[in-house]
């Protein structure tokens, strides 16, 4: 935000000292610097005639909701950067966000409506034909009182598009509105609801923390808002060694966040919550917590002594006590949890245990700790998020003939659900499947009618980020170029279908842009006198120019813990599918930094971008500890078969020192059977062999709970990568921990103290 120091701004927000209300950030961010036009005597080679125009919008390449600025020239989008005025991205953007141009200009985009013909192939049709076929079916079902036989399955969307979907399904009389994303953090939401009584995620203030303990949350890569977390990480690291923040990563396989941390601690998969309670026990036992409920905590944590926890987690007792003491002594401190730690059968209990650490050291509502977010200014409909169990119920309803029409928007469950969900066969039982996708992915390829949507760079929309940044924020997503093909905005398609089934009186808007303006009238009314005096049209134009809107209303700072939480706290050992004798390895599937859950695999820039931890491009691989590979007589590039109780994959080996010996890891994102020329038939999809193990509280898929075995095939391939052979070069820089679990690295070292795990 120009002319505003973010640190000071957040301090004022937290203290409640800013009284200017809505529109403050908006006015500041739209002040334009003076520009000087200086002609070139001899123009540089990369300059051509014409002027660049920048449009501020919102990135839709992942759920974080970063603000973006798009440079256009001669009507074509040329470059995407972060929007300096947007509090989430603050001028930065990840590689996937910058590759959004390749979604816009992708040669495999769907360019016009299509319908499956009698031969089972797609033929191009007009919009009138497609909308009439779908609209007539919806109108017939609604008139017959059978609107509940219509389901709408969308990727997770927020803002007024989410509200439009809800209104549309309400007019049909159907409760089957589902938002589905493979990586939605169901367990994190449930843990925060259970511990704090909050339906929204809090703001994790990495920027101002002095010590961060991360239990499985890869906050620099894929965890909820990685660009914003990267900003906080960078700011925290700017100070001198005795002042800057210290970061500790706890996980079975080193992530990007682990590589950037001061200390990486391997823990057995699914025991991260047990470790957190071990730290909590030591904090209380040493007299570092004196709250009125101290005795209740001591009784609840009696079984989590350092020695007992060390035996279960594989983390030395000395490390447990040292971390606990540091967490108390280094203020402010912060504990976060998620990712693989939340994807076990004990996921919710694990993340509740992490929240307990924040409570015991008193950092809730404090700068550098965990701050509650206020109610979003716009629509936020978390109750429609579908878990794995919900998706199974949808598939079962389809198999029983209870669904006549399924509308799918931007989600690809055929790729992101295990085959045990039988979702592909469920689609075959639905008489009319309609896809609004921009690409022919695995799910869209099974549709009967395709009504292709614009990409986000051609569409109207808005967003209210989740998680927020400690105060209310919103942004409008506007078209930055004219539509390239015969496609339409998702909201415009829904409004057209609503008119065709006679809902114009309830949904009277002619376009998504008109509906957005209607919705933002309410936000405009929240403004102060200066904002209201300028009128709505001027306010709307200012929002579009700034690319962000905000007000200084902060979240609730008062918090009182329900005693039942203490009485019920505890983390059971994780459960895994398959016997350890038959399946000796635990599979650790992780979101690819390049492809996320597979949505980025059709972008050639992302295919060519080396994986940050392995430098591999284009394909898939399985990461294996060097000792495990040595025992199995495997080397880099050897093809192995990975078999679970529910499937098998063939993939080359990559020797990865920073992974536990009984764990193997495969990135998610490749292995598409459709989705265009850049994604199809490249690599493998580890989701295809996951066991249908559930987290019992949320019904979400326990994706880290699958056991596998590994067998050599005797075949080899050469991995495509930019890195050379890892070697020590006589510098003695590789440190190990022995089977006894004794630390051999220096605690004060700023480098990763463990790079090869042997126990």
Image: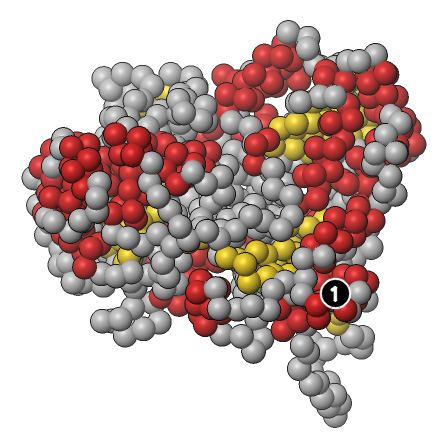
Does residue 159 appear in the picture of this structure? yes
| Quadrant containing the N terminus in the rendered view | bottom right
What crowding class fits label 1: few (fewer than 14 Cα within 10 Å), some (14-19), or many (20 or more)? some
Residue located 22% across and 71% down the image: 242
Instruction: Identify the image's colour scheme: rainbow, by chain, secondary structure or one colour.
Output: secondary structure
Q: Is residue 532 left or right of residue 388?
A: right
Q: Position of residue 721 (x, y in %)?
A: 43, 50
Give the left or right position of residue 635, taking residue 422 as reference: left
Choose between 55 and 709: the one closer to the eye: 55
Taking the view exactly as shown, the residue that stands out farthest to the bottom is: 41
Q: Secondary structure at mark 1?
A: helix
Residue ID for mark 1: 532
Residue at screen point 50% across, 24% down: 388
- Rendered position, 487 above or below 362: above
> Residue 690 location in percent, x, y?
43, 24
Q: Nearer the viewer, residue 673 or 67?
A: 67
Q: Position of residue 650 (x, y in %)?
A: 42, 28
Regarding residue 656, the answer to whether it shows in the image is no
Residue at x 86% of width, y 30% of height = 503
Q: Is residue 131 left or right of residue 317?
A: right
Residue 315 is left or right of residue 371, and the answer is: left
The answer to which of 181 and 502 lies nearer the viewer is: 502
Badge count: 1
Residue 282 % position (x, y): 14, 44
Q: Residue at x 52, y 51 (%)?
A: 374
Q: Residue furthest front?
A: 292
């Amino acid at each position: 935000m120009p002319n505003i120091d973010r640190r000071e701004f957040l301090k004022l927000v937290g203290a409640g000292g800013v009284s200017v209300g809505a529109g403050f950030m908006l006015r500041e961010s739209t002040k334009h610097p003076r520009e000087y036009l200086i002609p070139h005597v001899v123009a540089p080679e990369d300059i051509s005639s014409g002027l660049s125009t920048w449009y501020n919008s919102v990135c839709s390449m992942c759920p974080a909701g970063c603000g973006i600025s798009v440079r256009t020239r001669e009507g074509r989008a040329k470059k995407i950067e972060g929007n300096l005025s947007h509090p989430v991205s603050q001028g930065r953007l990840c590689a996937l966000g910058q590759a959004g141009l390749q979604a816009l200009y992708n040669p495999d985009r769907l360019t016009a409506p299509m319908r499956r013909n009698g031969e089972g192939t797609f033929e191009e049709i007009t919009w009138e034909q497609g909308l009439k076929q779908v609209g007539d079916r919806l109108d017939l079902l609604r008139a017959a009182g059978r609107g509940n036989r219509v389901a709408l399955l969308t990727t997770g969307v927020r803002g007024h598009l989410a509200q439009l979907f809800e209104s549309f399904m309400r007019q049909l009389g159907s409760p089957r509105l589902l938002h589905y994303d493979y990586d939605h953090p169901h367990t994190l939401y449930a843990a925060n609801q259970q511990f704090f009584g909050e339906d929204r995620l809090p703001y994790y203030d990495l920027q101002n923390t002095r010590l961060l303990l991360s239990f499985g949350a890869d906050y620099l890569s894929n965890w909820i808002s990685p660009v914003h977390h990267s900003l906080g990480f960078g700011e925290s690291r700017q100070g001198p060694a005795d002042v800057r923040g210290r970061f500790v990563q706890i996980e079975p396989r080193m992530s990007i966040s682990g590589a950037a941390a001061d200390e990486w601690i391997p823990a057995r998969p699914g025991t991260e919550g047990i470790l957190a309670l071990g730290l909590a026990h030591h904090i209380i036992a040493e007299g570092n917590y004196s709250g009125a409920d101290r005795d209740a905590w001591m009784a609840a944590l009696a079984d989590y002594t350092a020695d007992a926890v060390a035996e279960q987690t594989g983390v030395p007792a000395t490390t447990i006590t040292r971390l606990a003491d540091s967490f108390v002594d280094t203020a402010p401190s912060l504990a976060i949890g998620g990712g693989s730690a939340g994807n076990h059968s004990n996921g919710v209990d694990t993340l509740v245990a992490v929240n307990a650490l924040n409570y015991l050291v008193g950092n809730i509502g404090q700068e550098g700790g965990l701050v509650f977010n206020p109610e979003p200014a716009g629509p936020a409909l978390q109750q429609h998020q579908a878990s794995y169990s919900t998706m199974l119920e949808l598939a079962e309803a389809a198999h029983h003939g209870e669904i006549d029409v399924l509308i799918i928007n931007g989600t690809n469950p055929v790729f992101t659900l295990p085959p045990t969900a039988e979702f592909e066969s469920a689609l075959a039982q639905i008489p009319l499947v309609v896809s609004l996708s921009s690409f022919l992915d695995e799910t869209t390829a099974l549709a009967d009618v395709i009504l292709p949507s614009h990409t986000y760079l051609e569409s109207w929309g808005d967003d209210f980020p989740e998680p927020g940044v400690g105060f209310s924020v919103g942004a409008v997503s506007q078209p930055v170029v004219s539509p390239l093909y015969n496609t339409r905005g998702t909201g415009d398609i829904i409004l057209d279908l609503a008119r065709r089934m006679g809902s114009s009186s309830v949904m009277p808007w002619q376009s998504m842009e008109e509906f957005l303006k209607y919705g933002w009238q309410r936000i405009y009314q929240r403004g102060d006198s200066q904002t209201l005096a300028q009128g709505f049209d001027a306010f709307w134009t200012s929002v579009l120019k700034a690319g962000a809107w905000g007000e200084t209303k902060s979240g609730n700072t008062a918090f009182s813990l329900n005693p039942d939480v203490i009485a019920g706290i505890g983390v059971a050992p994780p459960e895994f599918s398959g016997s350890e004798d038959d399946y000796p390895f635990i599979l650790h599937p992780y979101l690819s930094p390049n492809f996320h859950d597979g949505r980025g695999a059709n972008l050639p820039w992302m295919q060519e971008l080396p994986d940050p931890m392995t430098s591999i491009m284009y394909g898939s691989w399985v990461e294996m500890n060097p000792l495990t590979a040595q025992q199995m007589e495997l080397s880099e590039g050897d093809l192995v078969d990975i078999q679970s109780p529910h499937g098998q994959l063939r993939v080359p080996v990559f020797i990865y020192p920073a992974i536990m010996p009984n764990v193997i890891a495969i990135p998610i994102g490749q292995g598409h059977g459709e989705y265009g020329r850049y994604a199809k038939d490249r690599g493998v999809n580890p989701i295809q062999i996951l066991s249908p193990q559930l987290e019992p509280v949320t019904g979400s898929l326990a994706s880290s709970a699958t056991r596998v075995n590994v067998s050599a095939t005797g075949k080899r391939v050469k991995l495509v990568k930019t890195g050379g052979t890892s070697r020590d070069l006589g510098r003695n820089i590789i440190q190990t921990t022995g089977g006894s679990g004794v630390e051999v690295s220096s605690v004060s070292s700023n480098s990763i103290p463990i790079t090869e795990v042997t126990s």
